[in-house]
Image (spheres, rainbow, N blue to C red):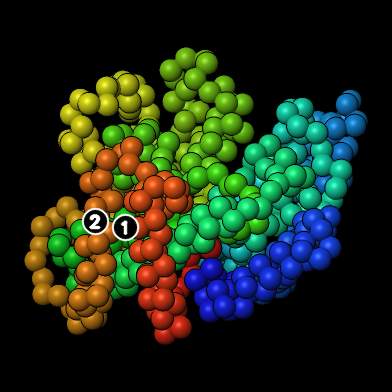
């Protein structure tokens, strides 16, 4: 079920709100988590009915293993290992089995052998995200940072809560543990949640989808029809699309959490204002970056064992981050690409430069590096990535094709231009504060603007203009 769909906005969400608050009005708060859990499973059932049982059974397994880790001191490494094997095994099978068999069959074909018989595996939506949340829980219990949850409903809700189930943000167990047990809904929180949801819908339906139409048209061109200006247009379009699309999902997820009294972590902090690739990863998909830092980079040794080991650890993290996004050589190369720049900045000391030195040049260079990386990320294959990058950096000039001219309509161009300021606004300007804090005049005006945009978003959604979020595929 997509947040920007008619069934969610006009059916599922009103039903959840009415039942959740109506139940509390007449029966109190005792079973409110149970109610949210039922709706969360219904939400997942709508989009991935065949995998709901896997989600439930793996949740039950981690609940039991968490208690075994806490109580069986001498065997807790065994139980932790079993949880890691279960979760990473499921993730590896569903996410990488098709890719592995395809590559092996390609080699067998080159050697003139029969291919391995294989029925393609369907990827359960959201598996990358809820797997990392379950790992966060068992590892934190193992490290004795927090006790295991006694209430299985609370634990299941932590894993499956519908606002962040499919595409994050990745919520640490320690972050939300107390909220599961005791939280307070309020009108202020509800108001801020509605504004945040409206803001996210506007980013997705108006801007991200418009950028996406142009991007899809460019990346859909045959290599011989791709020239320099069109290739850079496609790179620019996807750079805007993926930010507005993914940050829109995070905005809506955070807003939905606020409706029910949850405070979910922020996932973006103006990433295109970054002064370096290191700075970019402090701002982009922050919950994933922190997860890899705390559960992989630091356990590997972090920066405590010399420069060479630090660079190796950074490279390992970036490679695994690329693979986390999908089973494709382009994702692996994208991770290695970012890892190389992180290592260069570490060795040369560029990451330590004062923020006010060469600011404009550093922002521009960082943005170009990011855009080139997004071409790798967006390309369907290595050959497409090479052809696209060749067009970007080898000058040529060809006429605009008819298919691309249709995507370059006035509305799409207008919304792309409206998105461009994201490259120029100050790094410390928080638009979110202008939206969710209603105590000052500017936030009130921003809220009114959001409410005016909502009918337009609804009209586009009813017209069938919406699409799934990019990160649903991960």
The residue lying toward the viewer, choosing from 193 and 173, is 193
The residue pinned by badge 2 equals 420
In this rendering, is residue 89 above or below 363?
below
Q: Secondary structure at mark 1?
A: helix
Q: Which is more foreground, mark 2 or mark 1? A: 2
Q: Residue at x 57, y 22 (%)?
A: 301
Q: Residue at x 67, y 74 (%)?
A: 15
Q: CA distance from mark 2 to mark 1?
A: 8 Å
For the question of whether residue 249 can be seen, the reply is no
The residue lying toward the viewer, choosing from 431 and 91, is 431
In x, y percent, where is residue 36? 73, 61
In this rendering, is residue 338 above or below 394?
above
Q: Secondary structure at mark 2?
A: helix
For the C terminus, give its image quadrant: bottom right
Q: Are marks 2 and 1 in contact (CB under 8 Å)?
A: yes
The quadrant where residue 220 appears: bottom left
Q: Residue at x 52, y 61 (%)?
A: 194
The residue pinned by badge 1 equals 240
In x, y percent, where is residue 259? 61, 58
In this rendering, position of residue 366 left or right of residue 17: left
In this rendering, position of residue 203 left or right of residue 361: right
For the question of whether residue 198 can be seen, the reply is yes
The residue lying toward the viewer, choosing from 264 and 407, is 264
For the N terminus, give its image quadrant: bottom right
Furthest residue in direction bottom, as rendered: 463
């Amino acid at each position: 079920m997509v947040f920007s769909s008619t069934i969610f906005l006009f059916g599922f969400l009103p039903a959840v709100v009415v039942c959740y608050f109506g139940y509390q009005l007449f029966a109190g708060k005792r079973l409110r988590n149970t109610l949210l859990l039922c709706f969360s499973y219904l939400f997942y059932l709508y989009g991935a009915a065949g995998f709901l049982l896997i989600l439930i059974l793996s949740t039950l397994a981690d609940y039991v293993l968490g208690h075994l880790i806490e109580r069986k001191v001498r065997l807790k490494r065994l139980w932790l290992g079993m949880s890691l094997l279960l979760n990473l095994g499921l993730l590896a099978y569903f996410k990488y089995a098709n890719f592995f068999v395809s590559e092996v069959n390609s080699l067998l074909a080159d050697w003139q052998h029969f291919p391995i018989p294989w029925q393609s595996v369907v990827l359960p939506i959201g598996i990358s995200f809820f797997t990392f949340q379950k790992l966060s829980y068992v590892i934190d219990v193992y490290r004795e940072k927090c006790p295991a949850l006694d209430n299985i409903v609370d634990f299941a809700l932590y894993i499956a809560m519908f606002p962040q189930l499919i595409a994050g943000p990745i919520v640490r167990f320690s972050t939300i543990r107390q909220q599961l047990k005791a939280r307070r809904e309020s009108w202020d929180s509800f108001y801020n949640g509605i504004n945040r949801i409206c803001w996210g819908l506007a980013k997705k339906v108006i801007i991200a989808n418009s950028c996406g139409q142009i991007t899809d048209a460019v990346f859909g061109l045959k290599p011989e029809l791709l020239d320099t200006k069109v290739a850079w247009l496609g790179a620019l379009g996807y750079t805007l699309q993926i930010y507005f699309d993914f940050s829109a999902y995070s905005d809506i997820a955070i807003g939905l959490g606020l409706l029910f009294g949850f405070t979910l972590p922020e996932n973006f902090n103006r990433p295109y204002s970054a002064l370096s690739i290191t700075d970019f990863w402090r701002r982009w998909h922050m919950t994933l970056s922190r997860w890899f830092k705390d559960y992989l980079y630091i356990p590997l040794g972090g920066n405590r064992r010399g420069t060479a080991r630090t660079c190796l650890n950074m490279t390992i993290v970036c490679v695994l981050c690329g693979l986390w996004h999908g089973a494709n050589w382009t994702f692996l190369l994208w991770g290695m690409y970012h890892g190389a720049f992180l290592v260069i900045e570490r060795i040369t000391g560029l990451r330590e430069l004062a923020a006010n030195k060469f600011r404009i040049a550093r922002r521009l260079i960082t943005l170009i590096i990011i855009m080139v990386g997004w071409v790798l990320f967006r390309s369907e294959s290595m050959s497409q990535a090479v052809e696209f990058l060749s067009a970007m950096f080898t000058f040529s000039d060809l006429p605009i094709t008819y298919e691309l001219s249709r995507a370059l309509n006035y509305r799409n161009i207008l919304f792309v231009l409206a998105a461009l300021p994201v490259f120029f606004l100050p790094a410390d300007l928080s638009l979110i504060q202008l939206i969710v804090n209603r105590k000052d005049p500017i936030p009130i005006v921003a809220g009114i603007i959001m409410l005016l945009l909502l009918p337009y978003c609804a009209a586009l959604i009813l017209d069938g203009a919406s699409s799934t979020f990019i990160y649903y595929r991960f």
